[in-house]
Image (tube, grey):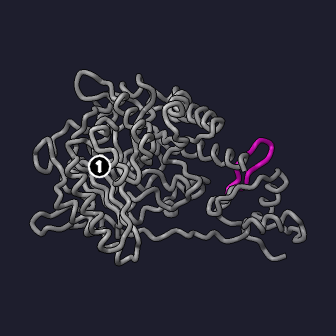
Amino acid sequence: MKTLTINSEIFVLPYGDNYLIYLPLKSLSVLVNADTIRLLNAIQAGKDIDPDLQVLKDLKHIGVFDPPQYDFKKIKFQPTSVTLLPSFVCNLKCIYCYSEGGERVCSYCDQKVSMISIEVAKKAIDFIITNAIVLKSKKIIVGFHGGGEPMLFANKLFLEETIHYARTQADIFKLTLYVSAVTNGLDIEKFDIQWLKQNFNKIGISLDGPPDIQNFQRPKQGVNPDSYSGALRAIQLFEAYGINYSIRSTITKHNVYRMREMVEHFLQITKLKNFHFEPLFECGRCETTKIEAPSPEEYITYYNEASDYAILHGAEIYFSGSTTNKISDHFCGAAGSNFFITPDQHITTCLEACRSDEEINQPFLIGEYNREVGDFIFDYDKIALLNSRLVTNMSGCDDCFCKFSCSGDCLIKVLKSTGNMFDITNNTRCVINKTITNFKIKKYHEKS
């Protein structure tokens, strides 16, 4: 018979007394027995196999002997979206904040309150519209993030002017405008809720659990730490006015064992069925508060418990290191396609690299707004290096079954863990990514 070559992007996962053949590039898993695995091992060893075996025909049908097809778009820096970090000012003092919002003096202008000017925001919108026209894209995206708290009422004029300009320009060029933001929710009721509904396509709200967890991990500035009440009020307004929103929680050593309880609580106070539970990565204010990340074992144990509870109640939890429903060769736009503007007018591809005075952030700081020329200046060598950071050229990821779901994992977290964003050897999140991806593959298989 003709020599068969097994697809190099096929992985075998133990499943009780049987196995799952997992084809990530096809988003497919198939249950097989030990005899099938022995057959594949024999083919791999070059042994003669009866070509008329039905199992061979079945394996051919699902693509076991097809060459892998990497249908990934090439990364390039021609953004049709911009995320604006209005300032580092914040009404909370979260114990793990990566940017130490509301605390540090701006290195660029030596003022505590530094804010993106409307001039820079408009220039950014002009830039993404130009790219959209060249790429024949029908949509542009404008987002607001931190830094600090982007939805402070003090930022209201900036938000209104930026969105109005973006919408006016989008209409002129017949483009659809999509607007998003993240918020802690505390100032939401100060805004005209109808204006929010009309102008924001989605708002993400940060909420770490029931009141005692939220108020400990995300306390308000000042004497009264209660931030839960404001976040809950924002959720109630979003639901009452039909505003599309999501919830993201940070999981620390303090709340990891209460993840199932967090799901239960969220299901009681919201209509949402999907919740983002991201394990803490120690950086920023963690250095002074000494708040710790959960151990991989703790996170995995309680994540699986919470996930089972969520599934039982028609809900789902997820985190960034395991996205089996969306495969990719790069983790996110931090790999040289994001266009984020920091409060001190620098351009970064990573939200966690928004402080320009920190050496570890330098690979992601790809440019800045030059006031003298009135335009953005980019470092295309840095962009090219980030573009080259693909899971397919990271040697530590070669034989990993979840490489297209974690996609080499978060660039800056890997950099901070190993000293090299291309080296996952000592990446603290790998065991979490692998274990939970394995767990999800099996759950999806059982569901299907």
Answer with left or right where residue 121 lies relative to residue 24. left
162 drawn magenta: no
> How far from the left and from the top, in percent, is residue 233?
37, 33
Answer with left or right where residue 355 lies relative to residue 205. left
Which residue position holds label 1?
A: 360
> How far from the left and from the top, in percent, is residue 99?
28, 42
Picture quadrant of residue 3: bottom right
- In the image, residue 297 sits, relative to residue 389, either above or below, namely above
- In the image, residue 161 sits, relative to residue 249, either above or below, namely below
Is the residue marked by circle 1 packed among few (<14), some (14-19), or many (20+) residues within 10 Å? some
18 drawn magenta: yes
Answer with left or right where residue 23 lies relative to residue 375. right
- Would residue 45 be visible to someone looking at this image? yes
Picture quadrant of residue 378: bottom left
> How far from the left and from the top, in percent, is residue 284?
30, 38
Viewer-proximal residue among 283 and 242: 242
> How far from the left and from the top, in percent, is residue 273?
55, 41
Prevailing secondary structure class for the magenta stretch in the rendered image: strand
Viewer-proximal residue among 76 and 169: 169
- Would residue 420 be visible to someone looking at this image? no
SS of the residue under disc 1 = helix
Question: What is the magenta range?
Answer: 11-21
Taking the spot 37% from the left edge, 50% from the top edge, the residue there is 197
Answer with left or right where residue 396 lies relative to residue 349. right
Taking the spot 19% from the left edge, 56% from the top edge, the residue there is 345
Task: Identify the image quadrant of the N terminus.
Answer: bottom right
Amino acid on which disc 1 is placed: Ile
Taking the spot 18% from the left edge, 68% from the top edge, the residue there is 375
Taking the spot 31% from the left edge, 37% from the top edge, the residue there is 189
Viewer-proximal residue among 82 and 266: 266
Viewer-proximal residue among 226 and 107: 226
